[in-house]
Image (cartoon, rainbow, N blue to C red):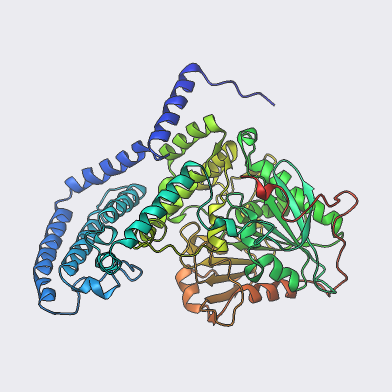
Amino acid sequence: MTATPPPSATATLDTLTHAALARMTGSLSPASLLLAWQDWSAHLATSPGKQMELAQLAQQQALAAFFQQRLLAGAQRAEVEPPALDRRFAAPAWREGPFNLWHQSFLLTQQWWDAATQGVVGVESHHQKLVNFWARQWLDMFSPGNQLATNPVVLRQTLDEAGRNLVRGAQYLADDLQRLATHAPPQGSEAFRPGHEVAVTPGQVVLRNRVMELIQYAPTTGTVHPEPVLLVPAWIMKYYILDLSPHNSLVKYLVDQGHTVFCISWKNPGEAERDLGMDDYLSDGFFAALDAINAIVPKRQVHAAGYCLGGTLLAIAAAAMARDGDTRLASTTFFAAQTDFSEPGELGLFIDESQVSLLEAQMAQTGYLKASQMAGAFQMLRSYDLLWSRLVNEYLLGERGASNDLMAWNADATRMPARMHSQYLRRLFLNDDLSEGRYPVNGHPVSLGSLTLPTLMVGTTTDHVAPWRSVHKLHYLSPAEITFVLTSGGHNAGIVNPPAPDSRRRYQLLTRPAGGAYLAPDEWLAAAPTQAGSWWPAWQQWLAARSGAPVKPPRVGHARYRPLDAAPGRFVLEA
């Protein structure tokens, strides 16, 4: 193998400059934003028809704003309704003057900019989405709901409490800033410690290597389904999203239903792991885990389930196994996992050549992508839920809600190795090599068309990371029998979905037989029946139907895979 030559002095200079720029801009590429703005503004400047439409819209809005004066005279109906999921102006106080005029003017402005940044002929699609997204972010900064002087709910609370809410808010802000400066976890996270309050399902670490620990969970039933289950979480997250508190632990649920469960716990990489690549996560992660399970539970196929990036890794592994005639898997399950990245959703706003190059320069210095960089991107995608509503509720209203296990887990973020993250962004997001049949494993490409195992997929209705329509694309890439589940919730809360008698959750489920006709997402949505409750029992029954007759539980560990530590192991505790 030929060694990679060291970068030239000029290339090193460029890398240092780009890394410094990334530190100043929060890892966002100014060039990417500038190109998008230039593309949009240049085409808008040469589109007189679009300009006329916007001028007419502005006139209509000015007229609507004038008639908002009727609200001051006692009319109860707003002329402009916010988007269906917009909760910012739901309080009755927003219907009183002058707050009605302020919030209506804001909504009109928001409508105008939404129209101005979309539908301009000639603008590249990615640039249009970028301009539209950043226009929304900029406008949100000036929303009357986010300001003390223009939010009637905050003003009423301040009056009722004689300003004590603002004092509490200032204390909360000071506490959060101190925790940020000292890299301490958010307030309330101390109540959800792995191995104490969360990640407490009994088990043993039976394998540890440079990228992961493999946990085997102790049985709780007299007999078990003979085929074990391997859970493959993403290494962008810590594994205990699948083993939170006992009442909402998917691991515990499966164990209690008579499944032998194994779960990968990925190492939180540092500078020493900078050169780990996707192939390392495949060989030392998935395949090493599968080898261990085959030794501990011999002569049994394995039900493999991957979550998010872990699901993408599972798809790559399953395609490689199909290519090579490896029949050790019984089925595959994908939780909010994409295999086609041609339409990745709003996360694609942060992924283009300029942006990736800037991240690569920054990672060349650190050896990894910081958890805070990924958290910042996710926060912008859900700015109202994760940023502005918190600012108002905690710092202005002085109301700090109690933390929970999912929130604490979300704050316990991980890093990404530089080489792996670069490969992930380029091969999957930028080039879409996996769905196009170009992704190499052991020097040869794999094809998703070779996947024929029974497959279950879970998409979530409000997923900003892996939109369900993107997840659904495997239907036309693979001829396998695919059972698709669409559940209420987002990327995390839709998966952490335990059965509960008072659950308001809903899901749709429909099976496409092997080799069956393709149903486009909207057709699937119309055809799939809706069911109340959690999708977990449906998945468990799906697994059981593809398993053999119950047998005696296997021993924990093996002569070559002796127990090393009790679950949750060591890697999950690394900061």
**Nearer to the camera, 210 or 354:** 210
Q: Position of residue 487 (x, y in %)?
A: 53, 71
Q: Is residue 361 left or right of residue 5?
A: left
Up the image or down, 260 lies above or below 377; here it is below
**Nearer to the camera, 91 or 551:** 91
Up the image or down, 484 lies above or below 361; here it is below
Q: Locate the N terminus and report the quarter of the image it occupies.
A: top right
- Most extreme residue toward the top is 9
Q: Is residue 472 left or right of residue 19?
A: right
- Most extreme residue toward the right is 559
Q: Position of residue 257 (x, y in %)?
A: 74, 74
Q: Is residue 331 left or right of residue 493?
A: right
Question: Looking at the image, which residue is at 36% across and 53% down?
Answer: 170
**Nearer to the camera, 307 or 66:** 66
Q: Position of residue 226 (x, y in %)?
A: 82, 68
Question: Looking at the image, which residue is at 69% across and 73% down?
Answer: 540
Q: Locate the C terminus and report the quarter of the image it occupies.
A: top right
Is residue 38 visible from the viewing direction of this image?
yes
Is residue 324 visible from the viewing direction of this image?
no
Q: Is residue 191 left or right of residue 302?
A: left
The total number of labels drawn is 0
Q: Position of residue 507 (x, y in %)?
A: 54, 75
Question: Looking at the image, which residue is at 54% across and 79% down?
Answer: 503
